[in-house]
Image (tube, grey):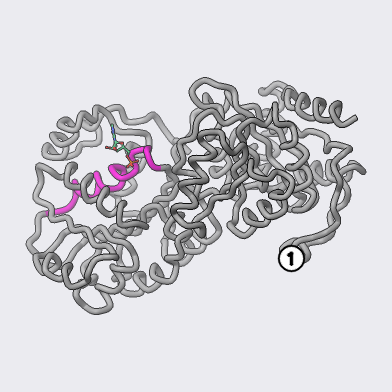
Amino acid sequence: MSTGEPIQSFEKLRISASMLKAMKELGFTKPTPIQSESFAPILSGKDIVGIAQTGTGKTLAYSLPILDALPYSEQMNPRVLILVPTRELVLQVVDQLEEYSKFKSVRILGLYGGVNIKQQIEPITQGADVVVATPGRLYDLAVSRILQLKNIKQLVIDEVDVMLDLGFRFQLNNIFDLLPPRRQNIMFSATMTTEIDLIIDEIFIKPTRIAIGFSGEPLKNIEQVSYAVPNFYTKVNLLAHLLSDKEEFKKVIVFVGTKKLADKIFDTLEGELGNSISVVHSNKSQNFRIKAIEDFDSEKNRIMISTDVMARGLDLEHMSHVVNFDTPEFPENYIHRIGRTGRAGRMGKSIIFFTNKEEDYKIEIELLMNMEIPELDFPEEVAVSSQLIPEERKLKVAKSPHGNSAKNQKTTAYHKKADKNTKENLGSKWKREGSKKYKKPQRKGDKIQNRNSKKKR
Ligand code: AMP
């Protein structure tokens, strides 16, 4: 999160006159928050992990310090490698880098699959300082020794969440093996996943983590509530129950961590909700995704189930609710999810389901937001399922929320977590000061539940 005051001008970053001139020409008056926060750490040569969405200016955030510090050279082999997930992004990043380095002599080369590899030999032999590439084609060119990676000093992996979602893990590993071990690693991603965490553990050395602090403002427009729910199928029952209120749940995005579970929810609810529900994730064809998103945006469909990665580029209008079917392990993902509602000054609503196992993640989210998410009682009329999905079978059987046991489990988990948080003892600090500082949350969301309960009676 944000550490200090944002830097208010490019001059204060002490970039060279040529870069400054490019910024002026582009009409960029001051660095964006991610730009001012990443500039010094990237320049220092440390490994960097940045959490930032598209549109925050992250391309300039990593390219400004890199381009600014890059000395003139006539050598053939590139010194900077930027990996991006798609051909479109290669073209976009190359365009941006060319604009940013307009008044400096830097050779930028874009390489991507889908075109004849032979056509790329000629531009490579011309020499390049910075290569922007998709992982598959880059690996093919490197392994066939058309492109030499031995002089790479800086590696940028951009939109790594999308890259992994598209199945590029294998290619990434192969590329890492071909790169010189002494190099700076920089990664940008909008969402965090355990798979990304594994890569960080494997190849990054003591990375500096930069996440642009979200301002508290957008959160004010979002009414947040939570339900303790014992397992997947009970979550499906609760979701179906909530969604049956068409008046209240007008336009809903349901977030789920994995494609497999997104499909499972869809399959379970499709019969009940028919053509008002759709599912999008990266295993669906491009045409299918476009149609699903269009139908949802035009309100032909009321409900869309989506994975974190798929939904992040969407700019959807007037969402009434965000349902977090699972509790994200990385708290920033929750902030991105709920930011899909409550836009443009409108009120939005967010609901989060958490199991006993996910309770710790919820506490992490609350600590990040410095507020507690009010918990609603589990509706009496919703059936509690004892059926478990394979992932849950390994865990101990959860008890019925009707018996108030989930709530007790929650309290225990909260205290356990608070005690466990020894770093700054944030947990207990939050308990002591946070609860004093922040008023007891209003249970506005009770309305939803009461209305549903009344209707059913
Ligand atoms: P990105 O997040 O890298 O995709 O950038 C989003 C857009 O913001 C791009 O079109 C950039 O040209 C623009 N941009 C980047 N940095 C700045 C800045 N400091 N001031 C104004 N616009 C910017």
On the rendering, which quadrant does ligand 1 occupy? Answer: top left
Q: In this rendering, does residue 421 appear at all?
A: no
Magenta part, dominant SS = helix
62 vs 269, left or right, is: left
Looking at the image, which residue sits at the far bottom?
Answer: 144
435 vs 197, left or right, is: right
Establish whether ligand 1 lies closer than 8 Å to the Cβ of label 1.
no
Question: The magenta stretch spans which residues?
Answer: 54-71
Q: Is residue 69 magenta?
A: yes
Q: Position of residue 345 (x, y in %)?
A: 51, 20
Q: Is residue 169 magenta?
A: no
How many marks the image carries: the answer is 1
Q: In this rendering, does residue 312 appear at all?
A: yes
Q: Position of residue 146 (x, y in %)?
A: 19, 75
Q: Is residue 49 above or below residue 155?
A: above
Q: Is residue 67 above or below residue 221?
A: below
**Closer to the camera in the image, 113 or 229:** 113
Q: Is residue 113 above or below residue 365?
A: below
Residue sitting at 59 percent across and 47 percent down?
278
**Closer to the camera in the image, 133 or 284:** 284
**Closer to the camera in the image, 106 or 336:** 336
**Closer to the camera in the image, 171 or 13:** 171
Estimate how packed mark 1 is, as few (under 14), some (14 to 19) or many (20 or more) residues with alpha carbons within 10 Å: few
Disc 1 marks which amino acid?
A: Pro
Q: Position of residue 196 (x, y in %)?
A: 49, 59
Quadrant position of residue 373? top right
Residue sitting at 48 percent across and 38 percent down?
1
Residue sitting at 70 percent across and 31 percent down?
246
Residue sitting at 77 percent across and 50 percent down?
356
> Which residue position is annotated with label 1?
390
Q: Position of residue 224 (x, y in %)?
A: 66, 31
- Can you say which quadrant of the picture contains the C terminus? top right
